[in-house]
Image (tube, grey):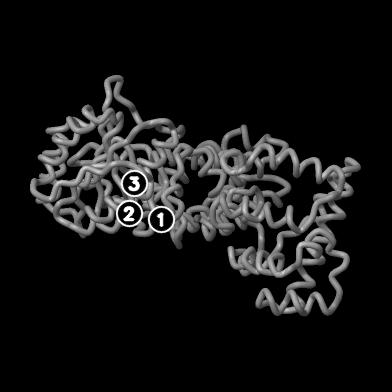
Amino acid sequence: MFEELSQKLELVFKKLRGQGKITEANIAESLREVRRVLLDADVNYKVVKQFIDDVQRRAVGKEVLQSITPGQLIIKIIHDEVIKLLGTSRAEIRFSPTPPTVILVAGLQGSGKTTFSAKLANFLKGKGHFPLLVAADTHRPAAIDQLEILGKEIQVPVVVDREHGAVEIAVGSIDHARKSARDVVIIDSAGRLHVDEEMMREVETIKAKVAPHEILFVVDSMTGQDAVNSAKAFHDRLDFDGIVLTKLDGDTRGGAALSICAVVNKPIKFIGVGEKLDALEAFYPDRMASRILGMGDVVTLVEKVQQQVDEQKARTLEEKFRKAQFTFEDFFDQLQEIKKMGPLQQVLGIIPGMNRLPSNMEIGDDALVHVEAIIQSMTREERQKPHIISGERRRRIARGSGTSVQEVNKVLKQFDEMQKMMKKFSKGKIPQALRGMQLPV
C-alpha cells in the first residue's frame, strides 16, 4: 500500500536532502512537487491545500532557514503534518463499563463490511473478549450466510434470524448477549450499492433502539474520493465514531486514507491489510505516516515478530547463529515464520528504506515458494551438509523442485553467504556481516 506515493515522495525528499542551503524559493518548489504527488494520489484538493499551507507556514520560519540540516527538518515537518492529517494519535474502541459493549458496523455494499465484522470479532477475541456477531443485513441473504461461515471459522457465535427485520434482530441480540455472557455485540447492518434513504432510515433506527457505544463506518480505500463522499454522507446522518479502511493491501493510491479524517473529523480506528481473518491492524497515525514517507514501521514489525516467533525456537536459533551451525532446515523453519507474518511485500513495506528498492524489482511470495521447493527437494543429509551437493545432486534438486539448476545455484550461493555472515556474527563482526545480507529472490 502507498508504494507509488512513497516512491514519488522519496524523489522529492532526495532533492531536498541534496540542497546545500534551503531558501524560500526551493521550499516553494519542493512543496509544489509534494502538492502534485498528493493530488496524483487522489487526496482531496481542499485537504492538499490546507496541508501545503500548514507545511509552508512552518517551513519558511527561522527554525528551518537557520537549521544546520534544513532538508531533514522540512522532511520532519512534512512527517508531523501527515500525522496530524491522519488523526494525531491512536483512537481506541470505547468499551462500556457495563457489558455488553455494542458496536454498530455500517457502510456500503462491497466495502468489506461483513468480513470486517468477523475480523473485529477475531481481533477482540484475541484480546480476551467474548464477542457475539449479529447478522442484521436482512436485505442480502448472502451476507447472513457469509457471516455464519466466518463465525464458525473463528469460533464466535452468530445471531441469525430469517423471520424478523433488522431492527428487531439488533434489539434482541443485546438480551441474547447478556444471557450467554457475551461482553461485545458486533452488529453487521445492511449495505447498499449507493447511499439511499431506505438504508439510512434503517440504520438510524437501529442506532436509536440499541444506543451503540461505537459506530464504525467501513470504507473501501480503493474507491478514492468516492470513499470520502460516502463517509461524509454517512457521518451527516449517523455521526459515527470511527473509520475502518479496508483493502489497503490492494492497488490503492492512498488518497482516501489521507483525506477522510480531515473531511469528517473522525479518526481511523482499524485498517484491513489482507483477506485472512487475522489481517486487521489497529491504526496508528504516526506509524502510517512513517510508512507513507518511506521511513518504515519498526514498531509494527517487532509486534508481528513477537506474535509469531516461538521464544524457545528463537533461543535455539540464536545459539546456532553463535556456533555457526545454521542449516537449510533452520532456514526452512525461518521461511515458515516469515510467511506467518503476512504477504512478503506487506512485511517488506514496514521495513525502513525498502521503498528505495528499484520499482521494477519483484519481491513476492513466489520467490519464497521457489526457495521452499528447492529445500524440500533436498535429502536430510543435503540440508544439514550443503557442501556435499554436487552437480548431479543440483540437477536432481532442480528437477524435483520444478526450477532450474541456475536457481538452485543461486539459493546455494545465498545460503553460503548467509553462513559466512553467521560466522562473522559469532565473532562480533555485525556491521560487516550485515553488508553482505541478501534477500532470497
Q: In the displayed structure, would residue 39 be above or below residue 59? A: below
Instruction: Name which residue type carries label 1.
Output: Lys
Q: What percent of the width, then of the height, locates residue 305?
A: 61, 42
Using the rendered view, name the quadrant where residue 139 is placed: bottom left
> Where does residue 253 sit, x and y in percent of width and height?
45, 59
368 over 426 or under it: above or below:
below
Q: Which labelled disc corresponds to residue 118?
A: 3
Taking depth in this image into account, of 362 and 375 the one nearest to the observer is: 375
Say which label, 2 or 3, has the lower sequence index.
2
For residue 247, the mark is 1
Give me the residue at 49% from left, 42% from top. Answer: 82
- Tag 1 and tag 2, C-beta contact below 8 Å: yes
Residue 271 x %, y %:
42, 46
The answer to whether residue 140 is seen in the rendering is yes
- How far, Cα to Cα, is label 2 from label 3? 10 Å
Q: Residues within 10 Å of mark 3 (few under 14, many from 20)?
A: many
First along the sequence among labels 1 and 2? 2
**3 or 1: tag closer to the N-terminus:** 3
Total number of numbered discs in the rendering: 3
Q: Is residue 402 left or right of residue 159?
A: right
Q: Which mark is residue 112?
A: 2
